[in-house]
Amino acid sequence: MSMSKPFKLLPHLLACLFFICLISCKEKKSEPEYTPWGTPLEHPSDETTPPADSTISLSDIIAQGELIMLTINGPETYYDYHGHGMGLHFMLCENFAQKIGVRLRVELCRDTAELTRRLVNGDADIIACPIKCSSPLVNCGPQWAVHKDNTALADEIRRWYTNGMLTETKHRQEQILASGGVTRRVYAPMINRQKGLISQWDHLFRKHAPTARLDWRLLAAQCYQESCFDPKAHSWAGACGLMQIMPATAKQLGLAQADIYHPEKNIAAAAKYMNQLMQEFRDIPTQHDRLCFALASYNGGSFHVRDAMALAKKYGHSPQHWGDVRQYILKLTDAKYYTDPVVKYGYMRGTETSAYVDRIIARWAEYGGRPGRTRTTGPSTYTGPSTQPTVTNDAAPRPAKKTNRYRIKVDK
């Protein structure tokens, strides 16, 4: 029995040893540590470090040269239009940024909860869309919001904003959209129909259309839609020349800014770009459908077209037929669709893009081209990849179902 006593005491001894080690470790931590050159090493304390101020003042914004705006995608707030920002509140905020001498950066949020959270966290300077807010945010200007601690920014917005600004900005936006934002001289759509002479640039269309494997008359029809054959045409968004090439697109295509108005170089760049878009949609099995997708992307951006394709697939229609996807390009003006989870890039002016494609195809036919047939009257049920044969421009036209009802008398 006496031999078992040490074993009974063992757990108590181990507990005492653990307690002694714990105390010694704490004492070591309290001892100062030194750097290799003999100076005490300081450890920052979480308790003494003040929290970083997440609010950037107006003077900081001006010094940094950038105002960060939070908003939600939509026709009245912000959306992409020909590679440039558009939307009533975006344009108004852009005016304010110009007034204080800084550039504007836009950050999109999904909902008002994200808008509030990101502004409170200091991710941005202002919410530039109508929002009802509570502390720590305050309203200013046209129902915008800033952090309550940023009184200088709120006061500056209140001094700048007047009641007539929304109406004036809306009127300016309507003017831009009505004209497509393009300043151009309007030339005749065809010089001599009998001789088949479309414009003075026909030799350039013939020369560069093969780059995109397109009929030269299609390129001519697209040019008329873009600039009415005016080589000096320019848009408010920065598009230039016969084919309205954007500066960023020109850079990507290797077209120097100094040459962007040069007729041949502008047409050559557009043909190169159309070729890139045709290649981007090589998953589309028919030539004519692929052409319509490329034209729509030239006007409205391929990212919006892909959004419409995703919607067509979601709702059981073919994402590979222009007639089906066209319906969803039109629906991207409706909040039900542009806020759908499958849509990544939000609102677009689908009516404009749809009309752009329709007018080019129609004018191409007027110029003597032979557009392939595509369904445009209504959606179909999507059952998988199409096995439809490729339709080319050289396909023979269908014979008329009925003979001409009028007899034509020919004098001999």
Image (spheres, rainbow, N blue to C red):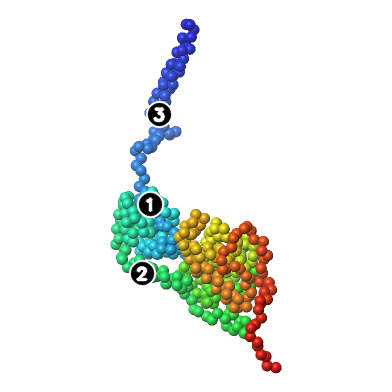
Of 344 and 141, nearer the camera is: 344
Residue at coordinates 40% horizontally, 29% vertically from top-left? 29
Which callout, 3 or 2, points to the residue nearer the camera?
A: 2
Q: Residues within 10 Å of mark 3 (few under 14, many from 20)?
A: few
Residue at coordinates 55% horizontally, 70% vertically from top-left? 357
**Mark number, residue 168:** 2
Q: Are marks 3 and 2 in contact (CB under 8 Å)?
A: no
Task: Report which residue position mark 1 lands on.
Answer: 116
For mark 1, give the secondary structure.
helix
Q: Would residue 10 appear left or right of 128 to someone viewing this image?
A: right
Residue at coordinates 32% horizontally, 60% vertically from top-left? 141
**Type of amino acid at the residue the image marks with label 2:** Glu
Q: Are marks 2 and 1 in contact (CB under 8 Å)?
A: no
Whichever of labels 3 and 1 marks the residue nearer the N terminus, that label is: 3
Residue 237 image position (x, y, % from top left): 47, 68
**Separation of marks 2 and 1 at Cα, in angstroms:** 28 Å
Which residue of the protein is positioned furthest toward the right in this rendering?
412
Residue 255 image position (x, y, % from top left): 56, 67
**Separation of marks 3 and 1 at Cα, in angstroms:** 43 Å
Whichever of labels 2 and 1 marks the residue nearer the N terminus, that label is: 1
